[in-house]
Every structure is written in structure tokens, then in C-alpha cells.
């Protein structure tokens, strides 16, 4: 699954969560009504963490993956850092 590109200024950061099974999704709720959504689940044990096209942070686990429209430059700009080739257990 690929992140659908939208204008950042209009939509903010984009993310996708892809799970191999509905069993990996533990909780979906709207604790404060329709203004807030909470998703809880697991992507399993971490297999790989890195960047796709240097603009998407990707965490791949044994049960699914999480992708966020966030570059290495964005992380460093907010005080964080992820070194090149940060984690890969493939």
C-alpha cells in the first residue's frame, strides 16, 4: 500500500496503517465524540524501520506496517534524529 499524496498545507501529515489481519487491531474508539479517533493495535515485532523515497517513515512489523509522510529532515528539524539505515532485521 502506498501513501496517497495530498497537499500538506491543506491536510497536514498523511499516514497509512496496513495490518495483515483484523486480529492485530485491538481497539477503535471515539473517546471524545466525532472530534477524536483512537486506534490501537500491533504491527508485531519490528522487522524494518527506515525511509521510503527519503520522504516517508516506514515501520514494518511481522503483523503489518505503519507509514507516515515524514522525512529525515523533518525529524531533525524538530529535535529528533534517525541515522541512515537505522534498523533493518530483514
Image (cartoon, helix red, strand yellow):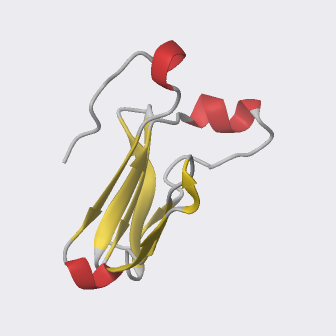
Location of the C terminus by quadrant is: bottom left
Give the quarter of the image for residue 19: bottom left
* Residue at 39% over, 65% down: 48
Q: Position of residue 35 (x, y in %)?
A: 56, 46
Total count of labels? 0
Q: Tell me if 80 is positioned left or right of 69 in this view.
A: right
8 in relation to 82, above or below: above
* Residue at 33% over, 62% down: 65
Q: Residue at the far front: name it.
A: 33
70 in relation to 45, above or below: above
* Residue at 49% over, 53% down: 85
18 in relation to 58, above or below: below
Q: Position of residue 36 (x, y in %)?
A: 56, 52
Q: Tell me if 19 is positioned left or right of 41 in this view.
A: left
* Residue at 55% over, 56% down: 33
Q: Position of residue 44 (x, y in %)?
A: 38, 81
Amino acid at each position: 500500500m502506498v501513501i496517497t499524496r495530498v497537499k500538506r498545507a491543506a491536510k497536514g501529515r498523511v499516514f497509512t496503517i496496513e495490518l495483515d489481519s483484523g486480529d492485530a487491531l485491538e481497539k477503535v474508539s471515539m473517546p471524545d465524540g466525532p472530534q477524536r479517533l483512537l486506534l490501537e493495535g500491533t504491527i508485531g515485532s519490528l522487522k524494518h524501520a527506515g525511509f521510503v523515497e527519503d520522504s516517508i517513515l516506514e515501520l514494518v512489523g511481522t503483523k503489518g506496517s505503519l507509514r507516515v509522510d515524514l522525512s529525515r529532515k523533518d525529524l531533525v528539524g524538530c529535535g529528533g534524529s534517525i541515522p541512515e539505515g537505522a534498523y533493518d532485521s530483514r
